[in-house]
């Protein structure tokens, strides 16, 4: 509690102790006490006013400093936000570029795989065709050889058959001649 507050309470006490003048609404007070209290209030008021002014100045200084710090914090936060946004944009750009590179790499990889599969299919097809041609050629050669062997065997057998037929015919003729000569001799 300030001195002025105490003095004002003293003033109220003096007014409360005032005596009522009969048949009127007026009261009698100790004027010397009131004057002394008012004088004390006047003397204390400049000091308390100075204290109040100092408090207000201090408050204003604190508010100014707080406002300055708040402005600095806001400016720093805005700068950090701009940096984060810039980093985020850089990150998004990098991610987009990375996604594009990955997509192109996948596309090229798929194209290489498709080309390799096509080449492998073509090579396999050519190899299969060549193998089939070789098998067909071998089968044809085998048939030709078998036909030639059969023809040779047939020719040989025919030649042997002819030779045997001639030999048999010769043997029959000779036998017939022998039988005829024996029959002539018997007769």
Image (cartoon, grey):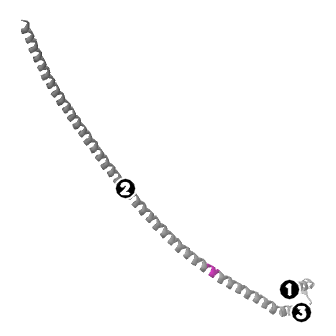
Residue 6: give x, y in percent of width and height. 87, 85
Residue shown at the point (87%, 87%) measured from the top left: 7
Against 66, residue 137 (above or below) is: above
State the residue position of label 3. 36
> What is the magenta segment's predominant secondary structure?
helix
Residue 86: give x, y in percent of width and height. 52, 74
Secondary structure beneath dot 1 equals helix
Image-based side of 56 in relation to 143, left or right: right
State the residue position of label 2. 116
Front disc: 1 or 2: 2
Q: Are marks 1 and 2 in contact (CB under 8 Å)?
A: no
Q: Looking at the image, which is closer to me, 50 or 9?
A: 50
Q: Looking at the image, which is closer to me, 97 or 5?
A: 97
Image-based side of 38 in relation to 135, left or right: right
Residue shown at the point (39%, 56%) measured from the top left: 113
First reached walking from the N terminus: tag 1 or tag 3: 1
State the residue position of label 1. 8
Q: Looking at the image, which is closer to me, 170 or 92?
A: 170
Secondary structure beneath dot 2 equals helix
Magenta region: 70-74
Between marks 1 and 2, how big is the CA–CA gap? 106 Å
């Amino acid at each position: 509690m300030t001195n002025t507050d105490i003095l004002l309470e003293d003033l109220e006490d003096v007014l409360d102790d005032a005596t009522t003048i009969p048949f009127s609404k007026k009261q009698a007070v100790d004027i010397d006490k009131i004057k002394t209290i008012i004088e004390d209030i006047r003397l204390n008021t400049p000091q308390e006013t100075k204290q109040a002014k100092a408090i207000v100045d201090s408050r204003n200084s604190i508010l100014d400093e707080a406002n300055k710090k708040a402005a600095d914090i806001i400016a720093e936060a805005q700068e950090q936000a701009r940096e984060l946004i810039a980093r985020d944009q850089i990150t998004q750009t990098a991610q987009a570029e990375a996604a594009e590179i990955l997509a192109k790499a996948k596309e090229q990889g798929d194209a290489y795989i498709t080309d390799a599969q096509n080449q492998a299919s073509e090579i396999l097809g050519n190899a299969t065709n060549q193998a089939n041609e070789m098998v067909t050629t071998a089968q044809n050669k085998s048939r030709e050889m078998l036909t030639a062997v059969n023809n040779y065997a047939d020719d040989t057998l025919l030649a042997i058959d002819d030779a045997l037929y001639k030999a048999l015919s010769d043997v029959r003729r000779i036998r017939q001649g022998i039988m005829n000569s024996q029959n002539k001799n018997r007769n």
